[in-house]
Amino acid sequence: MPVRASESSVPRIVFENEVKRSTDLTIRKSFAGDVPEAEQDEVFTFTVQIGGQPADGREYKFYASEDAEPVTRTVTGGTIELQAGQRAVFEYLGTGTSYLVREELPQDSKFECASPSSGYVSDDMTSSGASVEFVNRYADNPEEGSKANLKIEKEIYLPEDLPVPEEENGVFRFQLNIPPTAPYTGSYRIYGGGEPAEGRLVDQMTDGSFTLKGGQWIVVPELPAESEYKVTELADEESGWSLAAGTAVRRGTAGSSGNQTFLNTRASLMVKKQMESLDTELEQDFTFVLSEAEDGTLTGIAGAEYYLYDISDAPGVFLRKEEVKAGESEYLRRTDGLGRFTLQAGQAAVFVNLSDGLSYNVSEQGVDGYELTSPGPDGYSGTIEAGLVKGHTFTNQPKTVSAGTLSVTKLLENTEAESPAAGQPFTFRLSAADDNTPAVGRISYTAVAGNKTRPGYTENGVFQLYANETAYFESLNPGSYRVEEMDLPSGFRLAGSGVISTAPAKKMRETAQTTSVETALTGSLTMDTGLAFTFKNECTPGKLNLKIAKTSNSGAALDGAEFRLWMVNKGEETKDWAEAGKTEVALAGHTTADGGFLSIPSLIPGTYYLEETMAPAGYQLPTEPVKIVIAEQITAEGEGPDAAVKRSLTVTADGNDPQTIELSGNELPTVMITVKNDMLYALPSTGGTGTDSYRFPGISLMLAAYGMYLYAGRRRQGRR
């Protein structure tokens, strides 16, 4: 915008700059307590992963001291080395990039981890970067011939030193050998977990075995400092606990490494919510979906267990449930049937007991009036690893629209456990709402979703957005504008829409006008205010209505057949009827009627068995059910905003030809399959419907038997 000087004043131009916000990862090394001068130059090794991959070959800035000039180094073998007072900086990793840094202390090290207690940090980069510091303590080396105590401690680990609920506690078994080949049978004291402050004396350890709960420790007193020992934590795979740091077997001498801490965790995943600025409303709920990512599809994990924390101030506090049912935990929460859970700014969900090897995705569903600044719209994906707690941070800020800018936002909300196909575009048209506003032709815009942006142009006002994307139009003239959502894809329905007017100098919404659910909205854009449109859709996976036509082999319609429908559990599809795990599908009706039909609505893709439990009168009950497979196909034609996504369902049923239905519109398609029954071949004692069909085969059999009798008689006479 040009700057002009007035006739009576000296020109004054002011340039305002924002502080550079660099997404750097800084790794620092330091000591806690006294360290002998001879040990202060100890070199420590760290494993570094960035974006889920070893950082091998990446460059970083190495600082030999706090004030030293940086030197560029390259990661070799996925590890870096640091001494106390040194740091390494990986620059510009990008908001939302995951990282993991682990300190690799050898078993015979004279140092132990003071912070972080797990020996590693795993999280995601925020817009302001990340800094981690590894602090070590030195284990004193007593004089030769002196005595030393051996301390063995059990701690329960949650990330960021969050307090552990009592329910997280467990009982852990250990084996102690002194020397390493013989079970220890002497005395010891046990502390913590309700034991007396001075400890409880146990006169004799049985075969070197003892147990500890989280927060407890034992002390074996007055051992010769050179006494060698081996302590082993005995695994219990069914308990769900895994080691969070180190190994299950520790060795050493009582004097040089007489403290051993075993960290265990049931935590698997930590999801945090934060705002770019804390001067905004903090009581807004944000909804997240935890899904299993398998074969390109996302399925919400129902009933996943987690603990909720307030982490706005260190070290964080539990948030108890407001309503606790009899027999339930007051802390342990679960995701709903679609895998959803909610967080507010400054809160974290710590998930426990997720299966090792689980491929997961966690994503945030958009909230009207807020925009996600990190990560991207697809959220975070990864694999659960035993003993490693993955950390993911979602950052939002109130939505702002600058003066003279028009924005259009697309939000999605799941109504089923299965998430929609990735890359589904939604089509909109921007147009003038009155004759006084210039027509909209080819207009530039910028689409933003989290930390991802892309430029675009409208074609005759038409443009496309993806889930949780916002298009910003900055070159429109003031006027009244209309935005219409066009050609809503199959499986999606409009759930809410609204127009938001925003004052340019404020970060929070000044006025909000929510309209009825409509596909087109209008609003006025001026040079002094911005204008924001929001379109929210509910999405469902491909579904269809199944219609069963019950007939005889000759095609006659049969009423009175009763059925049960079973859906094969996920992962059991390749097994046969008898072996596969199945869940019964609730049906509104079970019996064919009105000409031999039975309607089953809203079936999602999967493998089903239709079991006939009662046949129509005069017909045989089948010995095997009808196997029905509903498969969804998603194909994309083209790339980027111009891509077209087509969805179809193919139904394969025993005794029927495969049928493929293309999904279009919002009406569920109906597919009909035919199930036939064989007649009973027995003479009925009374007449009735279908009696003649039994009578003629019966007479034929009797005549054939009589003919055989006459033939046999003649042969007997011929032999005489």
Image: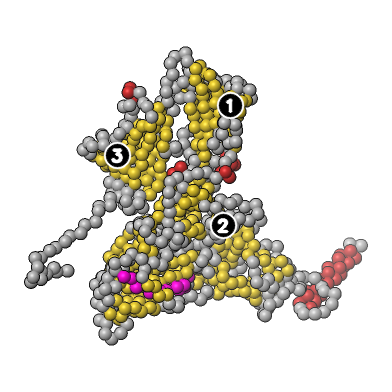
* Type of the residue with mark 1: Arg
* Span highlighted in magenta in the image: 489-503
Disc 1 is placed on an element classified as: strand
Can residue 383 be seen from the camera position used here? no
Look at 10% across and 65% down and name the residue there.
Answer: 11
* Type of the residue with mark 2: Glu
The residue wearing badge 1 is 189
* Type of the residue with mark 3: Ala
Q: CA distance from mark 2 to mark 1?
A: 40 Å
The residue wearing badge 3 is 88
Disc 3 is placed on an element classified as: strand
Q: Which mark is residue 322?
A: 2
The secondary structure that dominates the magenta segment is strand
- Pointer 2: residues within 10 angstroms few (<14), some, or many (20+)? few
Pick the quarter of the image with the C terminus.
bottom right
Asked if labels 3 and 1 touch by Cβ distance under 8 angstroms, the answer is: no
